Image: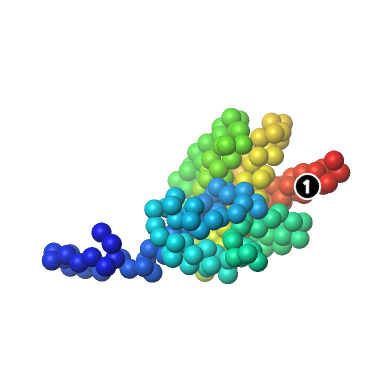
């Protein structure tokens, strides 16, 4: 049913889904794809292609892309096209610093109150992620990104901060392409242990050791970003 259609039968308590609600749904779908590393750094998102994929008109896509551009998750180009930001050393440093600060505080809060059943869930998620890395191919990079996101946000939700959680979500929107890039690097180097720090983080949380938990988180974040730096340097040298 279109936004302009009417019906004699109505359902009490429900309002019509207007264009603003459609725009929000498009925004949420794009946000989820960014967080999960579905888009590569530098990838151009053409409005018509996005609209066709989502089965919507151009207008809500334009509004959602503009909103994500304002939030720094996407980049509006001079020709008015929109792309996923390129990976640069300055952006790596900025995101790494911000993530360590904000996510470290959430881990500190979680360590004081995390439930035993949540620890069990974190173990299951980490094992699933470890198994996924074993069979990792470039086309599976999104799979490991999704699992990595589930692990981290299980911890962050356990922290119980309604203020910090949306900030982290914004940081992960900007970090998605970096997470994807690091997953591909891990896939090319089977000797690297992608989830070693996850296990250390779980052990620290179970022990209620906030400082050890924060240290494990920082090591997890910086390891991925350092891998990308090394890969960029190698590409420049070659």
Q: Is residue 24 left or right of residue 80?
A: left
Q: Seen from this angle, which residue lies furthest left?
A: 8
Nearest the eye: 223 or 65: 65
Q: Is residue 101 left or right of residue 140?
A: right
Residue for badge 1? 232
Do we see residue 203 in this rendering?
no
- Assess disc 1: are there few (<14), some (14-19) or many (≥20) residues with their C-alpha within 10 Å of its C-alpha: some
Do we see residue 143 in this rendering?
yes
> Measured from the top left, where is residue 11 in percent x and y?
17, 64
Q: Tell me if residue 94 comes above or below residue 133 in the rendering.
A: below
What is the quadrant of the N terminus in the image?
A: bottom left
Q: Which scheme is used to colour this image of the protein?
A: rainbow
Nearest the eye: 101 or 94: 94
What is the quadrant of the C terminus in the image?
A: top right
Q: How many marks?
A: 1
SS at mark 1? helix
> Measured from the top left, where is residue 156 in percent x and y?
53, 57
> Measured from the top left, where is residue 39 in percent x and y?
58, 49
Residue at left 48%, top 42%?
120
Q: Tell me if residue 24 comes above or below residue 120 in the rendering.
A: below
Nearest the eye: 165 or 142: 142
Residue at left 69%, top 39%?
185
Q: Tell me if residue 170 comes above or below residue 230 in the rendering.
A: below
Q: Tell me if residue 61 comes above or below residue 213 in the rendering.
A: below
Residue at left 49%, top 65%?
62
Residue at left 49%, top 52%?
49
């Amino acid at each position: 049913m279109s936004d302009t259609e009417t019906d004699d039968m109505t359902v009490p308590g429900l309002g019509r889904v207007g264009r603003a609600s459609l725009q929000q749904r498009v925004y949420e779908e794009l946000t989820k794809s960014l967080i999960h590393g579905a888009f590569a750094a530098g990838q151009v998102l053409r409005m018509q292609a996005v609209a066709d994929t989502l089965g919507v008109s151009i207008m809500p896509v334009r509004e959602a892309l503009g909103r994500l551009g304002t939030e720094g998750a996407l980049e509006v180009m001079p020709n008015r096209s929109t792309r996923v930001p390129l990976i640069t050393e300055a952006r790596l440093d900025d995101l790494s610093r911000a993530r360590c600060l904000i996510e470290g505080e959430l881990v500190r809060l979680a360590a004081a109150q995390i439930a035993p059943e949540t620890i069990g869930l974190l173990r299951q998620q980490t094992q699933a992620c470890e198994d996924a890395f074993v069979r990792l191919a470039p086309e599976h990079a999104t799979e490991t990104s999704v699992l990595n996101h589930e692990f981290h946000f299980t911890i962050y939700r356990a922290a119980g901060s309604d203020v910090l959680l949306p900030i982290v979500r914004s940081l992960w929107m900007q970090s998605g392409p970096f997470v994807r890039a690091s997953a591909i690097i891990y896939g090319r180097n089977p000797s690297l242990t992608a989830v070693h720090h996850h296990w250390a983080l779980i052990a620290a949380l179970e022990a209620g050791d906030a400082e050890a938990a924060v240290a494990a988180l920082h090591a997890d974040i910086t390891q991925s970003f350092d891998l990308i730096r090394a890969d960029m340097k190698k590409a420049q040298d070659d």
